[in-house]
C-alpha cells in the first residue's frame, strides 16, 4: 500500500495510464478517469487524512440476453461495462465500516452487530451490513475500514448500480481481510443475499454475477450455488458495432413492487405445477396444462412464463451467433428478445403509472432510426431506466445526437465491455 497523496501524484504524472487503459478499454476515457481518480483521492484525504490506502472497483453491467431469466434458474448473457464504482479505502482496527459515497454520508456499521435491521430495508446500510453478515456467517474475516466511493454507474437506470456497490463491499472485505481469496462467484452470491434478505428486493443473481466476474459471459443458473460460467470471447468492435445504453431519465429505484411481481407471479405458477422454479417444469408440461394454469394464476403469469422459456433458449442461440460470427442473426435475436419482453413479460412500463413510458418511447425512436441496421431492446429489470442498442459504428454519433435530441443531452452512452469484474486496482 502507499500514501493517498503519493498515488494521486503518480496518477497525475501518467504512471497509471496503462493500467487505466487496460481497465476501461477506451483511450477517450483516459483524461476523465485520471481526474476522477485524483478527485476521489483528494476527497478521501479531506475526509480521513493522508494515509495508506487501497483502491477497489466493481463495474456496472449490461444484460445482453436473458431478460428476467436468472431468478427462474435459466441462462443469461451478460457483460461488465467500463463504468464502475471506485473506492479509496483504508483498513481500521475498530471493526467499524464508515463510507461516504459521492454525496451520501452513510451511517457507520459496526461489524460486531451484523443482524438484519428492519428499519434499514431499502438503504445502503442494509447492503453493507448484509454482505458483511453473509461473509462472516460462512467463515470469512470481516473488519473495519473507512472509504470514499464514487460511481459513474447511473442509479436507477438498469445498469445495476446497487450490484456494483454490493460487489465493491465484498471485494474490499476480500482484499483487506481475506488476502483477495474470496471467489467472484461467492462475492456475487453474498451480494444477492444482501439485496434479497437485508435490502428487501427479490432479485436474481445475474446483476451481481456480471459485476463480480466481468467480461462477456454466458451464465447458466440451473444450480445457483454452482453456476456454470463461460466466457464469450467476442469483441463487438470486430463486427463494427457499438453497444449503446440510452438513459430515458426514468428512475426505477422506487418500482420494486412492479419488479417483484414478476418472480412473485412465476412463483405462484410454479407452485401450481408443484415445482419451485420454471426451469424445473418441462415446456411440454407447461403447455399441456396451460388452460388450468390460466385459471389458477391468471394470464399475465402465463405470458411471463412463455417469455422466460423463449428467452432462455435465445441465450444459447445468441452465444452461438456471436462465436460463429453471425452478427446479423445475433441482432435479430436481440430484437426478438425485446419484443418478447414488451409483449409477454410486460416490463417496459409500470402499470401503476401508464402515462410514464419513457422506455417505450426510446424503443420506438430506436426502431425508427435503426430498423434494418441495428438492434434494440429493454435493458435490465425494466419498467423505467434504460434501453440497450447495438448500433453500426458509422451511425453511432448520429444515433447519439438523435436520441439526445428527444431525451435530453447526455442520454445516450457509448460503452465497452470491461474484462475485469470486482477487483483490487491498488
Image: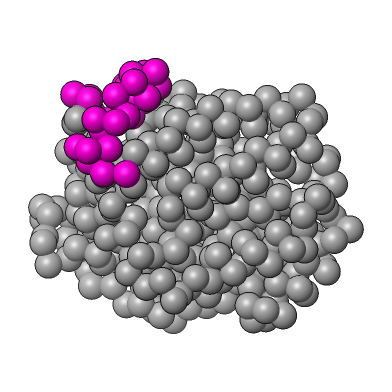
- Look at 39% across and 41% down and name the residue there: 303
Task: Report whether residue 180 is seen.
Answer: no
Residue 86 position, x and y percent, is: 50, 61
Residue 64 position, x and y percent, is: 59, 44
Vertical position of residue 101 compared to residue 15: above or below: below
Instruction: Give whichever of 329, 385 is nearer the camera.
Output: 329
Residue 383 position, x and y percent, is: 43, 62
Q: Which segment is the magenta one?
A: 273-299
Instruction: Give whichever of 311, 100 is nearer the camera.
Output: 311
Vertical position of residue 90 compared to residue 206: above or below: below
Which image quadrant for residue 108?
bottom left
- Look at 19% across and 49% down and name the residue there: 197
Tell me if residue 363 is in the magenta stretch.
no
Instruction: Give whichever of 268, 85 is nearer the camera.
Output: 268
Tell me if residue 280 is in the magenta stretch.
yes
- Look at 44% across and 64% down and name the residue there: 349
Amino acid at each position: 500500500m502507499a500514501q493517498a497523496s503519493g498515488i494521486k501524484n503518480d496518477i497525475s504524472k501518467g504512471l497509471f495510464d496503462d493500467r487505466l487503459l487496460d481497465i476501461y478499454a477506451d483511450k477517450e476515457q483516459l483524461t476523465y478517469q485520471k481526474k476522477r481518480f485524483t478527485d476521489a483521492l483528494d476527497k478521501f484525504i479531506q475526509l480521513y487524512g493522508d494515509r495508506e490506502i487501497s483502491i477497489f472497483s466493481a463495474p456496472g453491467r449490461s444484460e445482453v440476453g436473458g431478460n428476467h431469466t436468472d431468478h427462474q434458474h435459466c441462462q443469461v448473457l451478460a457483460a461488465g461495462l467500463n463504468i464502475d464504482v471506485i473506492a479509496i479505502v483504508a483498513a481500521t482496527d475498530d471493526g467499524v465500516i464508515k463510507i461516504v459515497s459521492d454525496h451520501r454520508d452513510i451511517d457507520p456499521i459496526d461489524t460486531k452487530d451484523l443482524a438484519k435491521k428492519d428499519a434499514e430495508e431499502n438503504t445502503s446500510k442494509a447492503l453493507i451490513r448484509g454482505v458483511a453478515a453473509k461473509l462472516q456467517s460462512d467463515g470469512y474475516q470481516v473488519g473495519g475500514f473507512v472509504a470514499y466511493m464514487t460511481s459513474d454507474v447511473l442509479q436507477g437506470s438498469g445498469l445495476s448500480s446497487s450490484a456494483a456497490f454490493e460487489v465493491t463491499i465484498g471485494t474490499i472485505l476480500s482484499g483487506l481481510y481475506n488476502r483477495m481469496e474470496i471467489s467472484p462467484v461467492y462475492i456475487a452470491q453474498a451480494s444477492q443475499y444482501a439485496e434479497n434478505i437485508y435490502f428487501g428486493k427479490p432479485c436474481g443473481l445475474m446483476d451481481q454475477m456480471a459485476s463480480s466476474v466481468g467480461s462477456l459471459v454466458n451464465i447458466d443458473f440451473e444450480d445457483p450455488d454452482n453456476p456454470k460460467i463461460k466466457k464469450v470471447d467476442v469483441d463487438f468492435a470486430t463486427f463494427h458495432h457499438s453497444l449503446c445504453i440510452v438513459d430515458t431519465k426514468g428512475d426505477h429505484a422506487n418500482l420494486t413492487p412492479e419488479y417483484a411481481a414478476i418472480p412473485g407471479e412465476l412463483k405462484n405458477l410454479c407452485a401450481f405445477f408443484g415445482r419451485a422454479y420454471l426451469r424445473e417444469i418441462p415446456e411440454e408440461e407447461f403447455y399441456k396444462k396451460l388452460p388450468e394454469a390460466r385459471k389458477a394464476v391468471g394470464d399475465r403469469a402465463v405470458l411471463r412464463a412463455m417469455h422466460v422459456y423463449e428467452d432462455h433458449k435465445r441465450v444459447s442461440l445468441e452465444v452461438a451467433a456471436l462465436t460463429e460470427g453471425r452478427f446479423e442473426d445475433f441482432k435479430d435475436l436481440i430484437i426478438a428478445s425485446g419484443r418478447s419482453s414488451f409483449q409477454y413479460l410486460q416490463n417496459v412500463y409500470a402499470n401503476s403509472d401508464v402515462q410514464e413510458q419513457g422506455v417505450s418511447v426510446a424503443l420506438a425512436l430506436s426502431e425508427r432510426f435503426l430498423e434494418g441496421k441495428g438492434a434494440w431492446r429493454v435493458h435490465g429489470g425494466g419498467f423505467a431506466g434504460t434501453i440497450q442498442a447495438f448500433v453500426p459504428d458509422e451511425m453511432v454519433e448520429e444515433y447519439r445526437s438523435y436520441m439526445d435530441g428527444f431525451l435530453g443531452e447526455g442520454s445516450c452512452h457509448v460503452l465497452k465491455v470491461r474484462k475485469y469484474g470486482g477487483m483490487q486496482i491498488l
